[in-house]
Amino acid sequence: MSPAERLRARIAETGLVHVMAAHSPLSAILAEEAGFDGLWASGFELSALYGLADMSLITMTQHLDVLRAMAARTSLPIVADIDTGYGNAINVVYAIREYERAGASAVVIEDKTFPKVTSLAAGGRQELLRVEEFQGKIEAAIATRGDPAFLVIARTEALIAGLGQSEALHRANAYREAGADMILIHSKKKNPSEIEGFSRAWTGAVPLVIVPNAYPELDAARVKALGNIRMMIYGNYGIRAATTAMQEIFRRIIADGGVQNVHKDILPVEEIFRLQKMDEVKVAETRFLR
Ligand code: SPV
Ligand code: MG
């Protein structure tokens, strides 16, 4: 089975897959060891890793390089966050070829104009594409994929743009008609009311994807009860967790005037050796170095 087929099979088998954001091969390895079903090659996380705002500043090449490196180090299916698809439908054709070749099993394309503005920022300038134009981008993605199991997920930012549920439903239906395999519905409201309302109103034939960053109380049990959400993406938890740990430890090293205290509160280097598969290197050394 291709990774994309495995992702589809896992969705069918469990009814709800848990996809963890990753911004590096190491974070991808940690997500796989923790037991997630897939990886989210998050634009937000990679932008943050570069110390940049998530506003189409990272190039497709930079994103592909990290995705390829993640695919080389894990066996989990990767859902690529390709933002707006890097331009129009022609750019989408090129992007789909490149992402499939790099090892992605799915893409999420959002209906904002390029350059996109990150969704969760207060007062973000959120401009949406004409529905017909975005349908063309979805059709381009579907027509281009080589593996029919490769998932094309259409993301509507109608709620993020403040356009309300009926516009979100209208757009989601139009994207489903264009062939989208799933619809990602996003909200920046601090509670899940918009998402729960959308899910209850959604009678479309394709399942939903959510990214519960702004409304963390919407856990798997509540999601399962809604009945039509099949994928939960933990969209910025990897970079926030890593930043939490580094911020605390770095500050303590300065405050303590050395590493004499923090060393016992962080992983020993042997654990990093394990993640680097140093054991395999040792075997190869014994075998080949003469
Ligand atoms: C990302 O992780 O890049 C996302 C999710 O697209 S969010 O940042 O919440 O828009
Ligand atoms: Mg993103």
Image (spheres, helix red, strand yellow):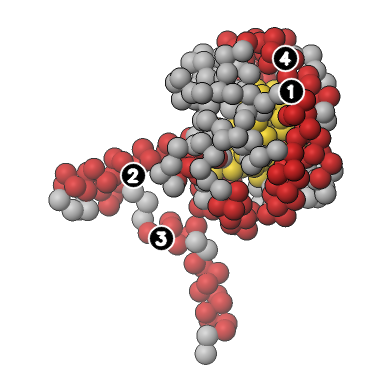
Distance from Cα at disc 2 to Cα at disc 4: 41 Å
**What's the residue at 59%, 53% (across, down)?**
61
Check whether the beta carbons of the residues at disc 3 and disc 1 lie within 8 A of each other.
no
Q: Secondary structure at mark 2?
A: helix
Which residue type does callout 2 highlight?
A: Met
Dot 1: few (<14), some (14–19), or many (≥20) neighbours within 10 Å? Answer: some
Q: Secondary structure at mark 1?
A: helix
Which residue type does callout 1 highlight?
A: Val
Which residue type does callout 3 highlight?
A: Glu
Which residue type does callout 4 highlight?
A: Leu
Residue with the mark numbered 4: 169
- State which mark lies toward you, 3 or 1: 1
**Which numbered disc, 4 or 3, marks the residue that appears first in the sequence?**
4
| Mark drawn on residue 64 | none
Distance from Cα at disc 3 to Cα at disc 2: 19 Å
| Mark drawn on residue 246 | 2
Q: Position of residue 192 (x, y in %)?
A: 56, 14
Q: Residue furthest bottom?
A: 290
Q: Is residue 58 left or right of residue 100?
A: left
Residue with the mark numbered 3: 270
Dot 4: few (<14), some (14–19), or many (≥20) neighbours within 10 Å? Answer: many
**Which numbered disc, 3 or 2, marks the residue that appears first in the sequence?**
2
**What's the residue at 44%, 46% (across, down)?**
49
Residue with the mark numbered 1: 131
Check whether the beta carbons of the residues at disc 3 and disc 2 lie within 8 A of each other.
no
Check whether the beta carbons of the residues at disc 4 and disc 3 lie within 8 A of each other.
no
Relative to 137, residue 146 above or below: below
Check whether the beta carbons of the residues at disc 1 and disc 2 lie within 8 A of each other.
no
**What's the residue at 59%, 23% (across, down)?**
127
